[in-house]
Image (cartoon, rainbow, N blue to C red):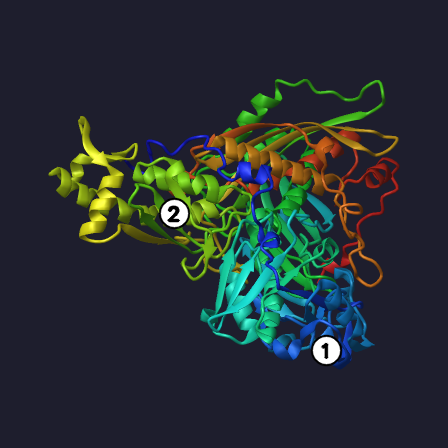
Amino acid sequence: MSDAEPSNAVVNFARRDARDKLRGRTRFTVDQVGPGTLHGFILRATVPSARIVKLDTSAARKMPGVRAIVTAQDAPGKFGIGIADQSLFAGDVVRYHGEPIAAIAADTLQQAKEAAAAIDVGLEAIPSVLTMADALAPDAPLVHEDWKNYDVILEAEGAKRGGNIAWEATVHRGDIDAAFSRNDVHIIESSYRVGRQIHMQLEPRAAIASCEDGRIHLIASTQAPWTVKNVTARTLGLPPSQVRVTSPPVGGGFGVKYGCSVEPYAAALARATGQTVVLIHSRQEEIQTCLCRENADIHIRSAVTGDGQIVGREATVLMDCGAYGGEQIYLTTMTAHTLGAGYRLGAVKMTSRAVYTNTAPNGAFRACNGVYNIFALERHTDEICGAIGMDPLEFRRRNVFGDGDIGSTGQVFEGNVLGPMLDRMEAMSKSRASRKSDAEGRLYGRAITVGTWFVFVGPSAATVNLNPDGSATVVTAGVEIGQGTMMQSLPQIVAAKLGLRPEDIIVKAADTDAAGFDVGVGGGRTTVSLGSAASVACDEVRKKILDVASEMLQTSPEHLVLQNGRVEIVGRKGAGTAVANVAEHAQSLSGPISGSGSFTRPGVPSMPGCAAGHFLDAIDMPVFAVHECEVAVDPDTGHVEVLSYRVVQDVGRALNPRAIHGQIQGGVTQGLGYALHEEVTLNADGQISQSGFGSYRVPLAQDVVPVEIVLHEGAPSIGPFGTKGAGEVPILNVGATIACAVANATGKNVQELPLTPPRVLALMLDKTEALDLRHMCL
């Protein structure tokens, strides 16, 4: 049985955790707090920028129930994803409203809160910058005056940083000046802006910390146990071996739990008290320190011939990283593979900057960087079509990547994927008649968009143990965050490799003491990376099974096959033995059968010298999407109703079509929130104004639109059995598709998301002010 043609890999395998979750029996981190556990609370700054001139905890330490208070002196280490620019606590300087100043452990949460209120904090206000325009203004105050002294954790050749620019990545391929100087081109210039988006996952960030055998044990609601382990150790000045992280089922993440959050604070308090400490964010704390999807400003300029050839493109993307670099340092790389991908380009010049502001740090969110860049790219594409008088679908068909085309960094793409996907979408679209308006005066519009993202592969490890009863246990650091990978695709992959049923595969909950390193669950990588590592481990297990069975059956391994829980002799149906018998026999003679495997990105070449400051010059596994929707716009209220939605998604190979359909439906719904009504506003102190579900509107049941779905299979993939990650991509095109459809319905230039009724009404009444992006011209 080869990876290309597994006998039992593709099934609609039901989620084994569905019944427990439906009945409320699943025990998340927040459900595992035992009696006698101390409660932690974090004292946070209430100003955006200040020097700390006094921090007196003496009175608070004497209050009833207080067991420990920790501050910056207890956690000296700095951390970050690309730059070590952040500490657990503000030491000398406060850089955003909500920044931790101290953490308290007490017998009850109320006692911890009262002690926090008793801490005497003296602050001396210093000027702040709350917007990227403020941060990039001449003589703007620096969010980090000592930025030159920070350690760079991830080196990237040619990177630039300085002042309030945390990181800059660039692409420069071909003669851009010559492209824009041609006499036969139209020059189209566009500007766009998007706001922040809050994850609003059901389970808030939470951690339970204890000291066991001289080590710290963290039970954490996290997407990345090894990141929590390493960052906690770094901030507390410990060897990573002194920290153990286990992760029960996680009640949603979408990226907010991809890094390290409350865990080191709980660990510091447990270390100080010698007792178990729980720290759980309230919903308000979760929102106001939530690592939102970043707000961004985008400017694009293209040189296009009359027949639709894109001979040159320039673009600048500014992403607000908030007070610390975090994920946005890395995301500067991804602009080249989202904004710069999908279409054939001649000369290319792109600049992507992460900008410091005195606001809460931003972070990863489903299809990070891609959602707003695809919005800008597809709106710009429609503006190009209007300028040259070409049908938008025809323009896309002429220009999307095909086999052998090169991306912005010179990477050569394999396979003709987007063209057939557009053809399939066009066939679906033709079945529905277009409308312009109705008796109520509503305006109708439709749009088709394309999007490119990629599976972030990264390193993973897995061990597969064959049990004496013929089942198998998979040990990894992968976490079940609701995406179903640990419950569905991983059992399917292992079962297919070993000839077992998916029901016979047990996936152990993540434990950094038991499992090898894994970079974390996110970026659509879990099925690909963990699945590939498990597949390699299965190869070892498979060989051992066949070797033992060969001796038992007196038949060479080449004449044996694993299927239906048995080792069968080829061509002799029923002449064999159960895998359980082989496992038991091996255990008694030579020991239990097990295998280990690892996997990481193989690396794809790009054009030397055209990318600077990038952590990935080329992508191992591109993923493509084509979306179409129809909307109705009420010109009197600005309300947008989504009437229909269709998706053609590149999945490589669909191991579990039903599970992928669920991911697409959920991703589209989440994208509708981003496109239409999820809006984050900041007050005069840089604090997020929204505080809960009552003031931040996520899509509700009545907002859900049934999605018509086609899974496109057959695109090149390095994933096991040809799979690609399917959970990240569904949100990618939604903002773009809604925006283009609204623009087509209204005839207005849509430049901002979300398209709330007041914003759409202002567009209709021509009361929208032109975007002022002068700060982008550095």
Q: Tell me if I can see residue 302 in this picture.
A: no
Disc nearest the viewer among 2 and 1: 1
Of the pair 123 and 283, the residue shown nearer to us? 283
Residue beneath disc 2: 532
**SS class of the residue under badge 2?**
helix
Residue beneath disc 1: 61
Question: Where residue 156 sits in the image (x, y, percent)?
Answer: 51, 65
Residue 98 vs 419, above or below: the answer is below
Q: Tell me if I can see residue 688 in this picture.
A: yes
Of the pair 169 and 60, the residue shown nearer to us? 60
Q: Quadrant of residue 332?
A: bottom right
Amino acid type of disc 2?
A: Ser
Amino acid type of disc 1?
A: Arg
What residue is rendered at 76% in x and 55% in y?
773
The C terminus - image quarter: bottom right
Question: Where residue 34 sits in the image (x, y, percent)?
Answer: 59, 58
Of the pair 66 and 370, the residue shown nearer to us? 66
